[in-house]
Amino acid sequence: MVVASVDNLADERSKAQFDVGAMKIVWAGSKHVFDVTDRMARIVASDPEFRKDNRTTLGRKELFKNTLRKMAHVVKRANELRLTEEEASKLRFFVDEPGYLDLHWGMFVPAIKGQGTEEQQEKWLPLASRMEIIGCYAQTELGHGSNVQGLETTATFDPKTDEFIIHSPSLTSYKWWPGGLGKVSTHVVVYARLVSGGQEHGIYGFIVQLRSLDDHTPLPGIIIGDIGTKFGSGAYNTMDNGFVCFNRVRIPRNHMLMRFCQVTREGNVCLSDVPKQMVYGTMVYVRQTIVSDASWALSRAVCIAVRYSAIRRQFGSQDRGIETQVLDYKTQQSRLFPLLASAYAFRFVGEWLKWLYADVTERLQANDFSTLPEAHACTAGLKSLTTSVTADAIEECRKLCGGHGYLCSSGLPELFAVYVPACTYEGDNVVLLLQVARFLVKTVSRLAAGKKPVGTTTYMGNAEHLMQCKSSASSPEDWLKPSVVLEAFEARAFRLAVACARDISKFSTPEAGFAELSIDLVEAAIAHCEVIVVSRFIEKVQQDIPGDGVKEQLQILCFIYALHLIHKHSGEFLSTGCITPEQATLANEQLRTLYGQVRPNAVSLVDAFNYTDHYLGSALGRYDGNVYATLYAQALRDPLNDTVVPDGYEEFIRPVLKQTMRLSRL
Ligand SMILES: CCCCCCCC/C=C\CCCCCCCCCCC/C=C/C(=O)SCCNC(=O)CCNC(=O)[C@H](O)C(C)(C)COP(=O)(O)OP(=O)(O)OC[C@H]1O[C@@H](n2cnc3c(N)ncnc32)[C@H](O)[C@@H]1OP(=O)(O)O
Ligand SMILES: Cc1cc2nc3c(=O)[nH]c(=O)nc-3n(C[C@H](O)[C@H](O)[C@H](O)COP(=O)(O)OP(=O)(O)OC[C@H]3O[C@@H](n4cnc5c(N)ncnc54)[C@H](O)[C@@H]3O)c2cc1C
């Protein structure tokens, strides 16, 4: 059955004022990436092994086994099709459920590449890339996660046997959370306190074998398992996040990842002259990938909400005629279009961050560590900003879809449940923003000493102007001038950072000031991260962009992104004196105009994400708009509808009815 709603999307598509095909290439990053992504998405969508519409109805054991089957199928297909690394990771991505492959390829392998010596890489990487071993990354403990220097697990060197003894001295030192650890991994990179000659030497990574390669049983001294069911149905429960306790497990000395610190046969600890934070390198790498992924999750939710808002009609007709598409309501637009704009903003900042990460990596290889603090601040700050916004946005999209958004068949509840831990893993978002704040306060104090800021803090070099400037916006159109928008964002961020630095100096120690002012510091950090996102978006739309009308649409989205933030944080823009209340009103007026300009293009702007119906996994977001028939078909497939009279009728419904009948006769 195809209902009238289908016409709505065709109609919407006919209104587009830009070349959707060209926008698809911009979204993908290049024609090559588009082609690879499109091909891999279709392979997954057309393979029944990758079916995912039954996930929320499976019990934990079935669900987990189902994921094991899919992960094995990914490896099989990657080998059969002789996929490149780029193709294989896209294929795996579109399978769209957390699984041990992510930790193996995304953390175990990068940890060895980043922290292993050449010799260690030669030994371990071939085994890992042929998947003769499966690895994970165990840093977090039951009692310690954010504070890495507080980890309790010890790795004590025993010069008699030339081994390290890996030990969990307490319940709180059990490794707890690592993905892939609970049931699958054969090996792990464990982070532990290095102890040699009775002295502690800091936290380092050690490769430990967990399970037999013959029968998968845990090796002696290892107590291991899954940490239990997590939030939401389906969602992250496809992953075996695990615990492990090490009872004096012995590993050869050369299983310590020794790129930055070597322990000799005699137990001498030799530090190389690189910053000790290099041992945190895997986290920096993964944070950077998480920023890119944020735009995928956000755009997916927005795609569902935009398409459904074009289908859904409510009110607007007194005589039972055709009702108004909810997408036409300004309130719907004001909640939805900033999220659409944010998806594009995060896509571009994610691409830029990839570039920054590649640049830093090249410098580190040449022993230039000068850009490391900035790379840390950018990856930490943008990871925090983009994941927090995305998690909130998915929930907002659910509400934007009204009651049907709450159904699992909308795809939104599971998307939220699977995405929201991104605000916690790879660093709690508040903890990471405090790292950014620390970097900003340091940058501000160095200004006073005449040090020129570089990279993303270059704007702070314009200190005098940023402290005094008043916005020149005197009409709504002025808020379409990149220089006006950027100046407001930079002035707000700089003034907040300077106020923090000034106020901290009033305390007896910087640490006391930092602790007391941490709320303000987090706000200053967010403001700085928003400068990065806004300026990268502006830079992007100032480039040559091929395709009819594509650049114009991106400009509209860029200003929506910036102006909705001015509205959201108007308190800060006003209290720091960067803009006046009248200018805030003008910005809002411009924002309303921009919503009107996006409206006819909204469906095509989400079509440009090029998502298959399989990947979207949503009755509400289907490409053909056949929402109601799909909702009905999926309802009929629910296990509860397997029988007309439910299980439990005889035991629990009939006796209640009989009891009621007896009572009514009295
Ligand atoms: C045939 C094959 C086919 C197969 C095909 C498959 C293909 C591919 C499949 C998959 C692809 C891959 C997908 C990847 C996706 C990955 C999945 C992700 C899933 C999520 C898993 C989650 C994992 C985790 O969560 S791991 C644990 C993460 N833990 C944390 O993040 C802890 C957070 N805490 C910290 O980072 C630190 O403790 C801290 C930063 C908060 C504080 O550290 P501390 O040492 O105490 O430092 P502090 O005193 O504050 O600062 C000292 C100075 O150090 C600077 N600094 C801190 N951190 C860093 C850093 N990282 N880098 C550089 N510098 C740093 C800090 O700024 C200070 O500097 P200053 O100058 O002294 O001020
Ligand atoms: C789905 C998932 C997968 C994971 N996978 C892995 C993995 O593969 N490997 C691994 O090692 N770990 C993994 N983790 C663990 C994860 O990295 C940690 O949970 C994360 O780093 C947060 O640490 P925590 O749990 O100790 O939080 P806590 O630090 O205990 O946070 C609790 C609260 O305290 C606040 N807080 C903490 N410190 C400060 C501070 N200094 N100032 C202000 N507020 C503070 C936080 O903001 C938060 O609100 C995973 C976690 C999840 C949820």
Image (tube, helix red, strand yellow):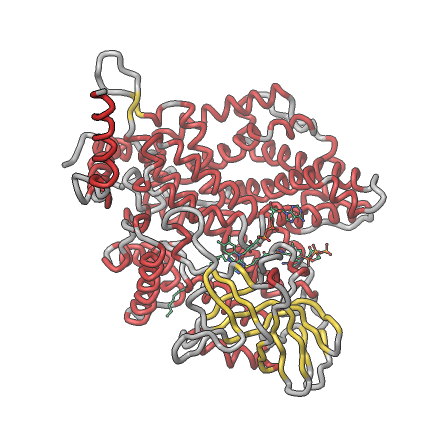
Q: Is residue 284 above or below residue 527?
A: below
- On screen, residue 429 versus residue 402, left or right, reads right
Residue at the image position 35 percent from the left and 27 percent from the top: 327
Question: Percent from the top left, x then y, of residue 655?
Answer: 23, 35
Q: Quadrant of residue 530?
A: top right
Residue at the image position 25 percent from the left and 60 percent from the top: 49
- On screen, residue 7 versus residue 255, left or right, reads left
Q: Quadrant of ligand 1?
A: bottom right
Q: Is residue 634 visible?
A: no
Task: From the viewer's side, name the closer residue of 483 and 505.
Answer: 505
Q: Is residue 560 above or below residue 419?
A: above
Q: Is residue 5 above or below residue 70?
A: above
Residue at the image position 42 percent from the left and 49 percent from the top: 418
Task: From the viewer's side, name the closer residue of 11 and 142.
Answer: 142
Q: Quadrant of the C terminus?
A: top left
Question: Percent from the top left, x then y, of residue 180?
Answer: 45, 64
